[in-house]
Image: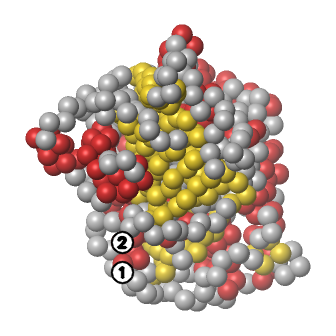
């Protein structure tokens, strides 16, 4: 959840570190710091200088403007606090008392308190409240001239999650190690790079190695070596990353989130690419999963990915008639679910690093489940632990609020439901072909949803209600999760309280909330349940509620009862969650910008939650 960058080579390390951190700030940003190894003025000895500040990266950049660091080896870090307030002292890097060794860390050291007690008893002086600083003092104790050995010996005492990077004044190298928290190495000519995620390294190299759990790496100007914690050499494949640097930049949009909302037609095209075979009217998935090899499905995820899983439940049960159970990962992993070798457990995750989902996956595997990942991030931890991966190919999603990954996940769920339905004989060719046509239309329908006049109207509606204290979102059937996702989008970037509900549930409690100050967004697009949804709208109006109705172009049923109408392109009901959500993403976006929120880096949130 923090951003990590390391460099060893011939460039000015400060430039590489700040540039890399600026492309990782979405991973956490309540403090930032760098450490650069430089030759002491006029002597052959070297020293490490640390500069670190609470606040966003810009605060550190300003500090470095006034007092730049020079040198060709360095490490850098942006932090999302887990232990200790976001202040200068708790910012990374953390150094030993003599300043000769510095570390940066992403993750949680679970046994740090007992380790810290021992270190304090042995005379170590701590300058922060963080768990991470323990690592600096442990390595200081185990260091006897060989930095790699010292790190390995220190990590043997550690329990928990870490992505750690270490450098020392007496060594022209950086040493890295990971367990749970991601680390990727970039291979250059006469230089080596390290980062917690690909975008940090893209301006310099496309050749990357995703370190595995338990890997240690020593990086120097001459290259790299990878071992495990026992010191046994490991061979890791080099992945050629096909994202170009711009793909991870804003591309002319004000924010990553808006760019990614507009990228959805392309992202969906990539999700569907090569998986729809017109000649046979079939879906072809690049997975080895045996479609008849299980009797039930559990889908496990967090946040937005969980809502995509809920849509998946509707689709798979409707089309493939396989019993599906969906749960949030943080509950699933502790409730001892009934899992056996006839259970397919699907984990859904954009980052592939969400610790709750990762641990739920591990629990499921212990019980003998077959596992499938519906994942965006290539090389992420989950992709290496599932039996199979159905990549969603949404490209890098930098905005903390998930948009294109959501629609890509739901599309992947739809493909899986179609594939299972056809393979298990519950979906006939005619219905399959009809649905396949609806799926093929998706990129065009989403493109249509983003037409300027539609977007301008949504912006007006958002500005009209931006000062509301609460929102209620209602949806039904396959669009009930759409209401949940619309509510999450609004609350996570505008900080307005919003709740999503199945519209049939409103009369069982939420109706008490209805008054003239409460905007109620109702997903009332074409569906066999539309009449019931219109009844819910009338119930709201009867209590002076304000209704914003999301309707299908040409609607004449729901619109007449609504205070405001947002019209979306006509889509097959099974694919409508993907088309409908775009309007709700924009409603949330324009509400947040009207309130001048930091849309890409909303308060308290991080893009990938890799701590429990
Ligand atoms: C979505 O807008 C949020 N940023 C958050 O709920 C996110 O979906 C959740 O943390 C899961 O992340 P993942 O898909 O990377 O596992």
Is residue 47 placed above or below 549 in the rendered structure?
Answer: above
On the image, the x and y values in percent for residue 177 come to 44, 54
On the image, the x and y values in percent for residue 51 come to 45, 23
Residue at 54% in and 10% down: 66
Quadrant for the N terminus, please.
top left
Q: Give the number of the disc on residue 363.
A: 2
Circle 1 is placed at which residue position?
Answer: 367
Q: In screen coordinates, is 252 left or right of 127?
A: right
Q: In screen coordinates, is 566 left or right of 177?
A: right
Question: Mark 2 and mark 1: span between their CA atoms?
Answer: 7 Å
Residue 306 visible at all: no
Q: Residue furthest right?
A: 279
Mark 1, secondary structure of its residue: loop
Tell me the colour scheme of the image: secondary structure
Q: How many marks?
A: 2
Q: In screen coordinates, is 436 left or right of 346?
A: right
Q: Residue furthest left?
A: 121
Is residue 539 placed above or below 442 in the rendered structure?
Answer: above
Residue at 79% in and 64% down: 273
Out of 318 and 237, give the one closest to the viewer. 237
Mark 2, secondary structure of its residue: helix
Q: Give the number of the disc on residue 332.
A: none
Q: Residue furthest top?
A: 66
Residue at 45% in and 45% down: 165
Residue at 16% in and 49% down: 114
On the image, the x and y values in percent for residue 500 come to 46, 46
Callout 2: 10 Å neighbours few (<14), some, many (20+)?
some
Q: In screen coordinates, is 391 left or right of 132?
A: right
Marks 2,1: beta carbons within 8 A: yes
Residue 279 visible at all: yes
Callout 1: 10 Å neighbours few (<14), some, many (20+)?
some
Out of 399 and 531, give the one closest to the viewer. 399
């Amino acid at each position: 959840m923090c951003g990590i960058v390391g460099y060893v080579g011939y460039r000015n390390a400060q430039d590489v570190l700040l540039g890399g951190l600026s492309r990782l700030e979405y991973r956490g940003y309540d403090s930032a710091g760098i450490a650069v190894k430089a030759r002491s003025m006029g002597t052959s000895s070297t020293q490490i200088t640390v500069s670190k500040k609470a606040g966003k990266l810009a605060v550190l950049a300003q500090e470095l403007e006034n007092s730049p660091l020079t040198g060709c080896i360095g490490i850098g870090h942006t932090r999302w606090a887990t232990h200790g307030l976001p202040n200068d002292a708790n910012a990374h890097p953390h150094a030993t008392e003599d300043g000769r060794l510095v570390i940066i860390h992403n993750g949680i050291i679970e046994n740090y308190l007992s380790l810290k007690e021992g270190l304090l008893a042995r005379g170590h002086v701590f300058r922060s409240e963080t768990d991470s600083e323990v690592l600096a003092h442990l390595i200081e104790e185990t260091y006897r001239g060989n930095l790699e050995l010292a790190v390995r010996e220190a990590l043997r005492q550690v329990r928990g999650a870490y992505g750690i990077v270490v450098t020392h004044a007496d060594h022209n190298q950086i040493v890295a190690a990971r367990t749970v928290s991601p680390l990727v190495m970039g291979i250059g000519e006469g230089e080596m790079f390290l980062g917690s995620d690909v975008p940090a390294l893209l301006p310099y190299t496309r050749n990357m190695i995703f370190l595995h759990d338990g890997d240690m790496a020593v990086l120097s100007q001459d290259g790299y070596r990878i071992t495990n914690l026992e010191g046994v050499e490991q061979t890791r494949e080099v992945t050629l990353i096909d994202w170009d640097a711009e793909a991870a930049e804003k591309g002319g949009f004000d924010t990553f989130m808006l760019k990614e909302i507009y990228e959805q037609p392309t992202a969906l095209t990539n999700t569907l690419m090569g998986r729809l075979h017109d000649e046979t009217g079939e879906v072809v998935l690049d997975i080895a999963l045996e479609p008849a090899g299980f009797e039930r499905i559990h889908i496990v995820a967090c946040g937005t990915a969980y809502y995509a899983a809920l849509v998946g439940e509707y689709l798979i049960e409707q089309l493939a008639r396989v019993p599906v159970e969906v749960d949030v990962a943080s509950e699933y992993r502790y409730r001892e679910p009934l899992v056996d070798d006839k259970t397919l457990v699907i984990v859904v995750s954009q980052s592939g690093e969400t610790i709750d989902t990762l641990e739920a996956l591990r629990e499921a595997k212990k019980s003998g489940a077959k596992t499938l990942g519906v994942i965006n991030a290539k090389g992420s931890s989950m992709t290496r632990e599932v039996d199979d991966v159905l990549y969603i190919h949404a490209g890098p999603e930098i905005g903390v609020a998930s948009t294109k990954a959501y629609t890509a996940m739901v599309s992947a769920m739809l493909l899986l439901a179609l594939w299972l339905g056809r393979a298990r004989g519950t979906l006939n060719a005619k219905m399959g072909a009809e649905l396949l046509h609806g799926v093929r239309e998706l990129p065009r329908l989403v493109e249509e949803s983003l037409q300027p006049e539609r977007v301008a109207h949504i912006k007006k509606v958002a500005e009209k209600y931006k000062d509301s204290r609460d929102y209620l979102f209602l949806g039904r059937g396959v669009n009930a999760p759409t209401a949940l996702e619309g509510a999450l989008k609004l609350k996570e970037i505008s900080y307005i309280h919003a709740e999503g509900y199945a519209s049939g549930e409103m009369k069982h409690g939420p109706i008490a909330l209805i008054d003239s100050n409460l905007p109620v967004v109702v997903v009332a697009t074409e569906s066999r349940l539309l009449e019931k949804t219109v009844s819910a709208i009338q119930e709201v109006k009867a209590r002076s509620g304000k209704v914003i109705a999301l309707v299908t172009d040409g609607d004449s049923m729901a619109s007449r009862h609504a205070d405001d109408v947002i019209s979306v392109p006509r889509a097959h009901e099974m694919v409508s969650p993907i088309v409908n959500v775009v309007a709700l993403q924009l409603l949330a976006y324009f509400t947040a910008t009207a309130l001048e929120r930091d849309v890409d880096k909303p308060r308290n949130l991080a893009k990938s939650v890799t701590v429990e």
